[in-house]
Amino acid sequence: MDQNDKNKNMRGADIVISILFLILGIFILIGAFQMPLKDSYGGVDSVWYVSPALMPIIIGIAIILLSLAILLYAIKQGGWELLKATHAERKKEPILNESTVRMLATLIPLFSLVFVHLRMLDFCIAVALYLTYTISVFYFEDYKILKDSLGFYSILMVINLLVRITGLNTMLDGLFVFTTDILAVIELIILILYLRKKVNASDIKDTLIKKYHQALGVSLITPIVIAAVFRFALRIPMPKEGFIMNFMYLIYYAIK
Amino acid sequence: MNILNQFSVFFTQIGSILTSPGQLLLLFGCTFMGIIFGALPGLTATLGVALLTTLTYGMSLNVAMVALMAIYVGAVYGGSFSAITLNIPGTAASAATAMEGYPMAKKGLAGKALGLTTTASAIGTVFSILFVVVFIPLISELALQFTSVEYFLLAFFGIQISGSISCPDTVQKGWLAGFFGLFLAMVGTDSLQVYPRFTLGYYPLEGGIEVVPVLIGAFGIPQIIQVLKEQQAPPKATKLDKIIPSWKSIGKRLGHIVRSALIGVGIGSVPGIGEDIAAWVSYGTAKGTSKHPEEYGTGCEEGIIATEVANNACIGGAMIPLLSMGIPGSPPAAMLLGALLLHGVSPGPMLQIDRPGFITEVAAILLLASFAMWFCGIFLAPRVVKILQVPPALFMPVVGILCIIGSYALGLKIFNLYLMIPMGVITYYLVKYGFPVPPLVIGVILGKMADANLRRGLMVSEGSLKPFFTRPVALILIIVIFVTFITNTSMYQNFKARRKAKKA
Amino acid sequence: MKKILLALMMVSLTVGSIFAQAQQEYPSRDITDIVVWGAGGGTDSCNRIIMEEMGKVLDVNINVNNVTGGKAGMIGMTEAYNKPADGYTLCGLSESNTTAAVYGWDHTMDVWDFFIVGGSPDILSVTPDSPYQTLEDLVKASISNPNSIKAGAGGPGSIHHLNLLAFMEGSGAQLAFIPYDGSAGSQNAAMTGEITVVITSVAEQAEMIKAGKLRPLAMMTPDAYTLASTTIPSSFDMYPELSNFLPLGQQIGFAVRADVPEANKTILENAFSEAMQSDAVKAFGEQHYYNLSGKYGEEAKEIFKNLESKFSWTLSDLGSAEVDPATLGIARK
């Protein structure tokens, strides 16, 4: 019975998701009918059955039918009421409830790492910026620190994003090699000091300080180890090789 | 060459490796490395073989083959480690293993699951070797029955499996996830007419959506979000005593193992398709023929045996078209072909005449590699499971980094990461609202194959559907598809009827 | 204390790595070769062997990575092109990449300097159970019954496809082209009997021909070719018209950005010439039926620009080019 109740609660969300899929299905069909249906293309004589639109049309129709089925079923099962109820409940709570904050704390570092940092900063520094925040705040298991530091971290990330968008980093690197990397290292140090301050201010300082050291250890050693293994043992070039990677080269060739 | 001669070549080869400490070390080292490669999300057998191709360039052919086969066997098997312990399949081939392995781990049986997959993989490899040695002409003949029509039907059968995968909510959601996967496979340049489909004029999309970023995105990222956001700790292994499965538990399932191995060898020997498809088809067949299909999805031992036997048996299968026709049976086999060419061996119909005994030597190396894999696996299993005792917040972000660098390493495309992360967030919500992930992944794996081969088949037959019914293999596949369809619907009806009876 | 240590480490890091970048002469660290085609293929094998030999000459590792995908290997070429023009990034490519510009890549082949290892000539074969004993048989049968004979020749837009098109144009043959994913797919389809005619390179067909699984009819080059003591005639002998369209030869090798400093380019050129003379490369060429070339500089660039023109205009005539070659400044040759 539990399972049934849980599934029933999904009906509200089902309405939203099935409508999204319905739109996708329509988009697929529109796209498919713009493809060459009959005429020759790419040196291949074409008839309907070799058209690149054949499968997309089938898929588009199937997605539309299936999402309609889910939509109708959800409405029949009282999905609208559920949706309204959840919406009303949601309104009572602050926009940033714990669940949302935790989600943001997971995703903001991940998105900044992939979309902003990997191409802009040395691989090790980019990863250290990700790990230092993510590991510390989740490992502390202290919601207050997590919430407070998320704001601070987000500001740093917005700065980095602006630098990336404006192309300031290429200009800085043109002035003096690795300028961006060095600035990012300073950013990392600020972040580490900030977290330290938060730990010091906490009521459970003693337990947290131990966790703080462990978290920092993992966050700073992991990128170096991963970069060294992938670059020198597996011979895979990193997305961006700057400050730290070049230093590693120096050591590698000195040993070699 | 007669059988007696073959045997002597086989045992001389085994003897020469066993008595040379250098080669033995290489064998174990490369197997070990392969397992690590397989276990790390994104790093695949193909990449492992490619890496060693360069590193073994200077070695003699025989020694190089030891290294290459060892890493191949290890990497195909290694994916099961992360699939079972973290629900993040390291390779597409082990995605099916996660279906049963992770629920087992949730029950605290991670150790037992790993022991079973290790033994199953070893048995799968040994079986496939037997086939390579004994039936090479027969199987290459069978593989030649596969024209576009059969490829399409095989892909269709694979896609059909997604309908039989147990769904947390209504069945339509499973189908919808499957079609969403198929749609993702359509994105990119069409391989028949070079027409760009759904690329929105954005050129990185022209290459299409690759399986690995979708796989890691769909399995890895939601798992990381769940652990961090919902503080949902990965399962701890509680029972570590019985890693090595008993003879009885293996003997009981001998028929099951032989069938899975046959599927693996068969699919491996068909050029162009590989371990991932073998694992899913074997899983689907195991569920379809099982006496208690309702246990699947809850940590069924038969399920992981089926997938692991099949994906490792695929290795031997893939050797058949590679060595007898010079046509690679799977992506890692394609790389192996390159490696052989660099060493001056030209696989093909002439290989038996140019280099008699070479196939037997390869089989001997494979056999030793599967033993090495078993020892490494049994040694690693309890140690890997211990990782789960580390606080998850400390290692899950590191797993995240490995997912990212692993997916990047395959093809060095940052675009794959741009795709993987949003994919992960989408799947997180899909999973939350009762959509199963496996059909989506199956759709992406098989979509292109189904599409291109259906149209190519019709192009060859000039629009006629006759080949679907006149070609023997096609007819068999159609019957299998039809039977699966029927059993699925009646199964579904039975299930419904039983539920009604319960309520009343 | 900790902070002082940290600061000291940073300073040493900075100074050290800046020196590492600026001072040493080329090549002082690993070179990366980005191969735009898949692992295990012709371009990949060729690059792996030549890079190994060049690595020995230059005394550094040259790492071969495959970055595939996109039309005409566009994704890999973009990856290689976006790396600094310092000679530490090479791009393993082949003749088929010359279509990139008409498929919408931002650059024409002018941005590269090429090093050509060689290529294997194209050959037309039929399945052994087919009735066609000579090229004339095949052409006649195809004319009397147009589009009934199926032909495979690698993917659409590949060098083999272009050879097939040129052959049909020059001989009047009317074959139905069935596209497969690459040469291996086409040859497998010939084995299964799905297609009758297959045009791929000698390197790819040699083992099949020797085992009698394919019957060679003619070379797509002006000269006859001897394979395992059988002489395969040139198609030009039977259809002199073909010389207007053929030969379209495979050119496998690698490239560097044209704006790499001349000094570094010269070092690469010397290493390349030396590597081409090595026994390993020679043996590779012989075993795999390659005509070794070893061309670089202006000569190689001329070859690629020619191919670019032929490929681009053929695709444009077929209606599958996305950009008009004329607007790209590619002259019709």
Image: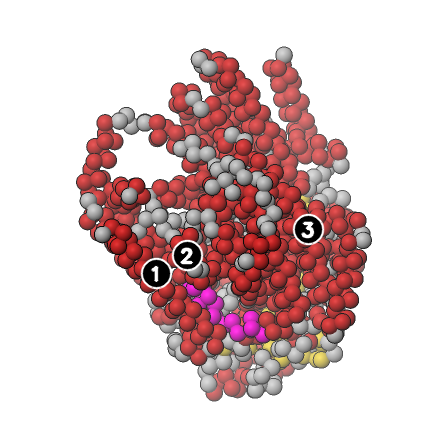
Residue B372 is tagged as 3
Asked which colour scheme the image uses, the reply is: secondary structure
Q: Which residues are magenta?
A: B141-158
Q: Amino acid at mark 2?
A: Pro
Q: Amino acid at mark 3?
A: Ala
Mark 1 or mark 3, whichever is nearer to me: 1
Tell whether label 2 touches label 1 (CB within 8 Å): yes
Mark 3 or mark 2, whichever is nearer to me: 2
Can marks 1 and 2 be said to lie on one chain? yes
Residue A171 is tagged as none
Quadrant assignment for the N terminus of chain B: bottom right
Chain for mark 2?
B
**Which residue is rendered at x = 63% and y = 45% of the image?**
B378
Q: Earlier in the sequence, mark 1 or mark 2?
A: 2
Tell me how far mark 1 sits from mark 2, CA to CA: 9 Å
- Give the residue pinned by disc 1: B491
Q: Secondary structure at mark 2?
A: helix
- Give the residue pinned by disc 2: B293
**Which residue is rendered at x = 59% and y = 31% of the image?**
A222
Can you give x and y, in whole percent of width and height, for residue A14 in the image?
27, 45
Q: Earlier in the sequence, mark 3 or mark 2?
A: 2
Q: Nearer the viewer, residue B302 or C154?
A: B302
Q: Magenta stretch containing residue C291, yes or no? A: no
Q: Magenta stretch containing residue B143, yes or no? A: yes
